[in-house]
Amino acid sequence: MSVHAVPARHPLDPEPAPSTKARAVFVLGLAGLLTGPLIGGVIPATVALLLARQTVREAYAAGGYLTGGRWIRRGRRLAWTGLVLALTALVVATIAGLLHLAAAPGGPDFAPGTD
């Protein structure tokens, strides 16, 4: 018997089925990545991470009969990248706003000799 032999399956075991939520995690993660620099990517990325957690639990409970682990991992990576891009865009916008405020003259500008 080979080391990589697959154990015999019981005739009543269900066929492995792809998880539809796994693809949804990937799509939401991709949307989070693409819209992350616009700060709007926070919402789809957060939903992707929450859905990924739920999908992993369901796949574990299914005992290996739900497939799609790769889609979940890819979706998580994309979602985290989208969150990092959104955070970076927010920090850059904040710094640009502060620099703009610092360069603006302060107070009213009166003519010379005015009390």
Image (spheres, rainbow, N blue to C red):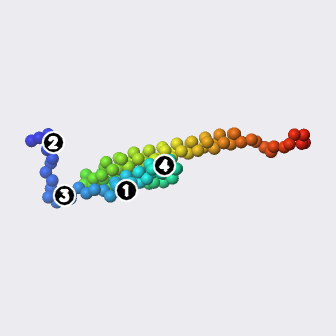
- Where residue 107 sits, quadrant-wise, is top right
Closer to the N terminus: mark 1 or mark 4? Answer: 1
For the residues labelled 3 and 2, the Cα–Cα distance comes to 20 Å
Residue 19 percent across, percent down from the top left? 30, 56
Mark 1 against mark 4, which lies toward the viewer? 4
Residue 112 percent across, percent down from the top left? 87, 40
Residue at label 3?
13
Q: Given the image, on which type of amino acid does mark 3 rest? A: Asp
Residue 105 percent across, percent down from the top left? 74, 41
For the residues labelled 1 and 2, the Cα–Cα distance comes to 33 Å
Q: Given the image, on which type of amino acid does mark 2 rest? A: His
Closer to the N terminus: mark 1 or mark 2? Answer: 2
Closer to the N terminus: mark 4 or mark 3? Answer: 3
Q: Nearer the viewer, residue 59 or 97?
A: 97
Q: Nearer the viewer, residue 45 or 55?
A: 45
- Where residue 61 sits, quadrant-wise, is bottom left
Q: Is residue 101 visible?
A: yes
Closer to the N terminus: mark 3 or mark 2? Answer: 2
SS type, badge 1: helix
SS type, badge 2: loop
The answer to whether mark 1 and mark 3 are in CB contact below 8 A is no
SS type, badge 4: helix
Residue at label 1?
24
Q: Given the image, on which type of amino acid does mark 4 rest? A: Gly
Mark 4 against mark 2, which lies toward the viewer? 4
Residue at label 4?
36
Q: Nearer the viewer, residue 113 or 76?
A: 113
The answer to whether mark 3 and mark 2 are in CB contact below 8 A is no
